């Protein structure tokens, strides 16, 4: 997963016509660490349809505030610069939960094209 390090880089990533999912997380977040081992496989599984990028909420506070990120990890799907869906809750996210969200985002994107 490509790590975004500047607001300009983030803006460029979400402006893409391809479906881009920003994963907002932090080094100190235990639920973020929980998803780390399986995220490369999930990313590979959706590689044809989704561009996943990582946003560190501590390093990218402005971007996190602009997108009202209150809890992490948060998954926000963008297409052409607009938010199409988000997956945010207080519960620990399982691999199947994340896969289901990504598939829903892909289905929504395909329905809009």
Image (tube, helix red, strand yellow):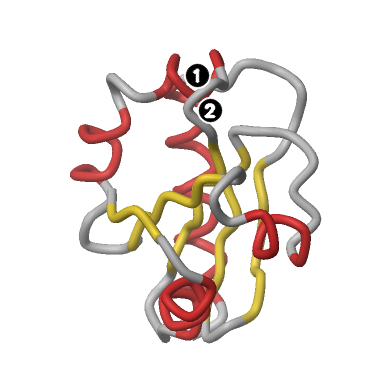
- Quarter of image, res 95: top left
Pick whichever, 99 or 40, lies toward us.
40
Pick whichever, 10 or 88, lies toward us.
10
Element marked by disc 2: helix
The disc label shown at residue 39, or none: none
Q: Is residue 56 above or below residue 111?
A: above
In the shown orientation, is residue 24 left or right of residue 4? right
Marks 2/1: CA–CA distance: 5 Å
Q: Given the current orientation, which residue lies at the most extreme front position?
A: 59
Count how many numbered circles sit on residues in the image.
Answer: 2
Q: Position of residue 33 (x, y in %)?
A: 43, 19
In the shown orientation, is residue 3 left or right of residue 33? left
Q: Position of residue 1 (x, y in %)?
A: 28, 48
Q: Position of residue 14 (x, y in %)?
A: 49, 76
The residue tagged 1 is 94
Asked if disc 2 and disc 1 are in contact, CB closer than 8 Å, the reply is: yes
- Quarter of image, res 101: top right
| Residue in view at x 50 percent, y 56 percent | 22
| Residue in view at x 40 percent, y 60 percent | 4
Element marked by disc 1: loop
The residue tagged 2 is 97
């Amino acid at each position: 997963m490509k790590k975004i390090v500047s607001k300009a880089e983030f803006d460029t990533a979400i402006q893409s016509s391809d479906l881009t999912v920003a994963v907002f997380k932090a080094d100190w977040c235990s639920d973020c660490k929980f998803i780390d081992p399986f995220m490369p496989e999930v990313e590979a599984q959706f590689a044809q349809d989704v561009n996943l990028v990582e946003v560190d909420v501590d390093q990218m506070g402005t971007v996190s505030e602009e997108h009202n990120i209150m809890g992490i990890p948060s998954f926000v799907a963008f297409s052409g610069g607009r938010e199409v869906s988000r997956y945010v809750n207080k519960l620990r996210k399982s691999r199947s939960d994340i896969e289901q969200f990504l598939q829903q985002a892909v289905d929504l994107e395909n329905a809009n094209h």
